[in-house]
């Protein structure tokens, strides 16, 4: 059922050269899994990453069912060839959907994604990110799903780290309810593998950015800066601007996510760039790309946020044959152009 096809893409120039250790030695970066005729569920498939993933999966020949409650996702972002069910992953109806459609592969991306909101309302975060995930796992186990790929979180799970870039062997010490729920879901996946033989891969995403990210609903700083700068408003920087993150472009993330259907069984794998960028440097780069003339507004740092976060992607290179291809400046240029066209 699973085959490999070539999906060539012109990556253009990048701001940072990709270190040699990132480059796959056996699997070319242009290879993508083709799931021709495979029944696939994508929870959160109307959201930023989810909808981009659905587009790639349909190109690969998959038969897609999108499950999304549209709390942050957008109906218009769903590919016309995908079947759409407006449904919360916590709903009892989800089990009926599994029984009727019998997916072979599940990509579980539905989540409450705002770390700050998880601090304000940890109960809501737990219901969506843990109880909702358990409901998905129950459906997978009962209907003998072949593989579930779970969208976890690289920064939130590790907490403040001793090593930058941080690899998967580092201790997990989340500092937010969001990170706690994501880590708990990873442990439940291990339980379901042991109890039911459910094959899984957890992908610990870094800070994903790109077209379709909602500056009002999905908490991405790149989207927020682009929206503000292009409309002439001064963006807000929290703390002194030295906070760092690992910004990875959405196309690279969707490629890694699809690759996980064929590799990484029982593994948790970082998906990032191994490049650490401060919020201030991000601001300056986007200011130059947008010709923004204003100045940032500074506010106190917010509770639950990390000072530094950057992920090692050596394991992804080794196991998935994957490495990031889109450098930060190119990815920001693409993202800004997408926002500019929608002004």
Image (tube, helix red, strand yellow):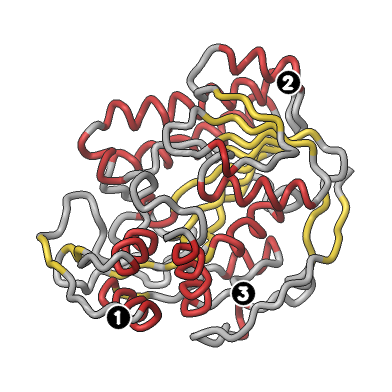
Q: Nearer the viewer, mark 2 or mark 3?
A: 3
For residue 143, the mark is 2
Is 97 left or right of 130, judged from the image as shown? Answer: right
Q: Is residue 28 left or right of residue 16?
A: right
Q: Residue at x 52, y 25 (%)?
A: 89
Whether residue 266 is visible here, answered yes or no, is yes
Q: Report helix, strand or loop for mark 3.
A: loop
Rendering coords of residue 178 (x, y %): 34, 41
- Which residue lies under the disc numbered 3? 325
Q: Which mark is residue 198?
A: none
Is 127 left, or right, of 316 in this rendering?
left
Task: List x then y, in percent, for residue 168.
Answer: 49, 59
Residue 49 x %, y %: 54, 50
Q: Which residue is mark 1?
A: 284
Of circles 1 and 2, which is in front? 1
User: Horizontal placement of 339 versus 59: left or right?
Assistant: left
Location of residue 148 in the rendering, given as x and y in whole percent from the top left corner: 66, 38
């Amino acid at each position: 059922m699973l085959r490999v096809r070539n999906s060539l893409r012109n990556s253009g120039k990048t701001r940072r050269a990709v270190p040699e250790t990132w480059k796959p030695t056996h699997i070319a970066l242009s290879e993508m899994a083709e799931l021709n005729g495979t029944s696939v569920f994508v929870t959160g498939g109307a959201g930023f990453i989810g909808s981009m993933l659905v587009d790639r999966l349909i190109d690969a020949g998959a038969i897609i069912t999108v499950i999304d409650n549209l709390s942050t996702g957008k109906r218009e972002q769903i590919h016309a060839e995908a079947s759409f069910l407006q449904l919360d992953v916590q709903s009892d109806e989800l089990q009926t959907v599994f029984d009727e459609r019998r997916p072979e592969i599940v990509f579980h991306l539905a989540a409450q994604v705002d770390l700050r909101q998880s601090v304000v309302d940890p109960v809501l975060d737990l219901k969506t990110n843990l109880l909702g995930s358990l409901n998905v796992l129950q459906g997978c186990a009962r209907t003998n799903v072949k593989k579930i790929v779970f969208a976890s979180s690289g920064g939130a799970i590790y907490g403040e780290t001793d090593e930058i870039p941080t690899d998967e062997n580092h201790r997990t010490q989340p500092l937010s309810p969001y990170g706690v729920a994501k880590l708990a879901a990873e442990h439940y996946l291990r339980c379901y593998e042991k109890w039911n033989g459910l094959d899984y891969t957890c992908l610990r995403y870094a800070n994903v950015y790109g077209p379709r990210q909602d500056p009002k609903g999905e908490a991405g700083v790149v989207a927020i800066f682009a929206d503000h700068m292009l409309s002439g408003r001064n963006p807000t920087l929290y703390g002194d601007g030295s906070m760092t993150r690992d910004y990875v472009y959405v196309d690279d993330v969707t490629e890694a996510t699809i690759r996980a259907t064929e590799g990484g069984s029982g593994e948790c794998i970082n998906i990032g760039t191994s490049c650490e960028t401060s919020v201030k440097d991000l601001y300056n780069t986007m200011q130059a790309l947008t010709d923004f003339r204003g100045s940032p507004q500074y506010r106190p740092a917010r509770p639950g946020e990390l000072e530094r976060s950057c992920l090692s992607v050596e394991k992804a290179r080794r196991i998935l044959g994957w490495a990031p291809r889109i450098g930060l400046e190119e990815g920001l240029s693409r993202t800004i152009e997408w926002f500019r066209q929608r002004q």
